[in-house]
Amino acid sequence: MEITARSLWTMMHGMGFGALYLLACSGAIVELYRLTRPSESKPSESAPNSTRFLNVYLLTMVVLAWAAVLTGAYVIYPWYRAAPPPGTVNLALFPQRLLMSSPSTIGWHSLGMEWKEHVAWFAPISITMVAFVFIRYGRDLRLHRPLRTAVLTFAIASFLSAGIAGFFGAMINKNAPVQGGHTIRLSQGEAK
Amino acid sequence: MNPPPNTTSPTLPNGSGAAALLSASIGSFALAVLAIAGDKSALLKSHLIFYKPTGPLSGVTTTAILLWLATWAILEIRWQKKSVALKPICATALVLLVLSIALTFPPIADLF
């Protein structure tokens, strides 16, 4: 069982940082909503623990979101957009050119990657703001209702942005996978 | 006897939250505008290549992030001890956020 270095980085970017971030989003939105409900006028005894937990949870999400976009833009994207030498016939190592070489796949680049490469950045920017505001105000955020509404909307927008980027990332990698780099042997297979 | 904790009026002024919110939306909007501008102008596109393997995306995102952080720092210094009018700030931030997402959508970006 083998994997190439570029595939491993792509997995870390998408299935590691990106997918974990998406999984965490729904929990963060529900907890933000629950802990800052305006009707919650009297904090329960478990409130400080819940607030501390959400602080750590949101900070972890901030790290995941930045790790996802930075590995995407500075590790994987250069492999994706690499220009083939003149006369190259096999475009397997040049995913962008491979997608653009066929009318049935060009849309994955012209719409998918063109949107993904920019919209993805709204996820870390938004969740950094959300984490800062919640850590600063905690459950008192419920007393600043317009701010609470806006923070929840940015958290949902962060989820949406990451979802768009994740969807197109998965589809692009399915149609033109990032390949190459040295091969890492994970295990030695045995014939049965 | 200590009075019960105040559960109906804010203990912290809202300025710090408003600063974080507005600057995040300004940074997002700047990213969307820079992405379109870099796509339309060859000169700007070449200036936005901060890291050659990543191309203009490196300059678009780095510039937008620096603008976001600078705006945040300035607004935080000015508003952190103040209570500001939240409703217009939140409305502006939400409009900028929607515009940012819309402007990065290629069929809309291509209209410019």
Image: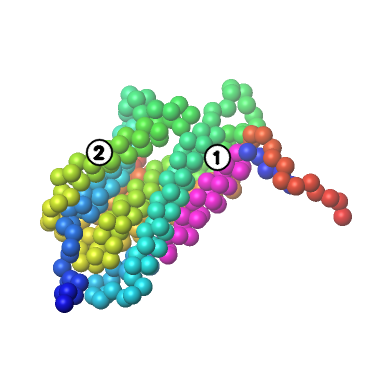
* Residue located 48% across and 36% down the image: A74
Work out whether disc 2 and disc 1 sit on a shared chain. no
Residue bounds of the magenta highlight: A6-29
Q: Kindly report the secondary structure that dominates the magenta region of the rendered protein.
A: helix
Marking on residue B70: 2
Q: Is residue A153 above or below residue A177?
A: below
Please tell me the numbered disc located at residue A99: 1
Nearer to us of marks 2 and 1 is 2
Instruction: Look at the numbered disc 2 and give the secondary structure of its residue.
Output: helix
In the figure, is residue A89 to the left or right of A35?
Answer: right
Residue B72 counted in the magenta span: no
| Three-letter amino acid code of the residue under disc 1 | Leu
Q: Amino acid at mark 2?
A: Ala
Determine the CA span between mark 2 and mark 1.
38 Å
Q: Chain of mark 1?
A: A
Task: Give the x, y percent position of residue B55.
Answer: 43, 30
Image location of residue A182, percent across then percent down: 67, 34
Viewer-nearest residue: B51 or A97:
B51
Who's the residue at 46% across and 55% down the image? A21
